[in-house]
Image: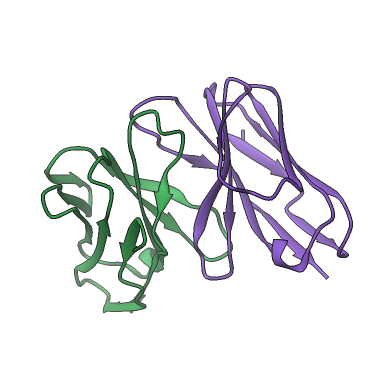
Chain colours: A purple, B green
Amino acid sequence: DTAVSQTPKYLVTQMGNDKSIKCEQNLGHDTMYWYKQDSKKFLKIMFSYNNKELIINETVPNRFSPKSPDKAHLNLHINSLELGDSAVYFCASSHKGRTEKLFFGSGTQLSVL
Amino acid sequence: QKEVEQNSGPLSVPEGAIASLNCTYSDRGSQSFFWYRQYSGKSPELIMSIYSNGDKEDGRFTAQLNKASQYVSLLIRDSQPSDSATYLCASSFTNAGKSTFGDGTTLTVKP
């Protein structure tokens, strides 16, 4: 069973469109995250949620809106997509607390044309 | 100054050699340090975590932490071609709600 699963794996879309990425974890973790990885492999935190509550919003444009219906799910909706949004988006989860060991989903490769 | 800096590489070592990957961090409050391995086209996978000064060994991997120097390293002994990947260093502090990553070092192990 996949521990952290996200869909879709690939997303190709036109500028200006709205798209969503879904994430689910079955590890029983309290905290879920969205990270963005650019073409140079740099991983940057976007959002983190603990038990459905937003705890980190790292100066992300408000075109990006996360939603956590329960602690096992964290979705990411992006409005009015721009060329610069093209990247790989990773969902991750961890136990809240000292370790912050992250378990990543397989990633969504977003290409905005 | 970046919060977490790594040698950008790429780093190339022959099979069987020791690969040494280095990382420095700027926030003295950082308490937890991690090494993730990322194969091309795949997601990062945690391979080592370290919280106290000194060495921590797990199989062929040794993580080293020196908080006074704000330095973390990863040694891979008896490197194998399957170790070829990008290695990401990350730091966090308790209940921060996030880990901060370096740019990664790409390692190639040549047969």
Q: Residue at x 63, y 49 (%)?
A: A60
Residue A51 x/y as whole percent: 58, 20
Q: Is residue B14 left or right of residue A49?
A: left
Q: Residue at x 59, y 54 (%)?
A: A36
- Whether residue A106 is visible to the viewer of this picture, yes or no, is no
Q: Residue at x 53, y 66 (%)?
A: B40
Tally of marks: 0
Image height check: is B72 above or below B28?
A: below
Q: Is residue B71 left or right of residue A33?
A: left
Quadrant of the rendering where the N terminus of chain A is positioned:
top right
Q: Observer-nearest residue: A4 or B96?
A: B96
- Whether residue A72 is visible to the viewer of this picture, yes or no, is yes
Residue A38 x/y as whole percent: 58, 64
Q: Is residue A43 left or right of residue B47?
A: right
Q: Residue at x 54, y 21 (%)?
A: A28
Image height check: is B83 above or below A24?
A: below
Residue B85 x/y as whole percent: 42, 66
Quadrant of the rendering where the C terminus of chain A is positioned:
bottom right
Image height check: is A15 above or below A63?
A: below
Q: Observer-nearest residue: B63 or A1?
A: B63
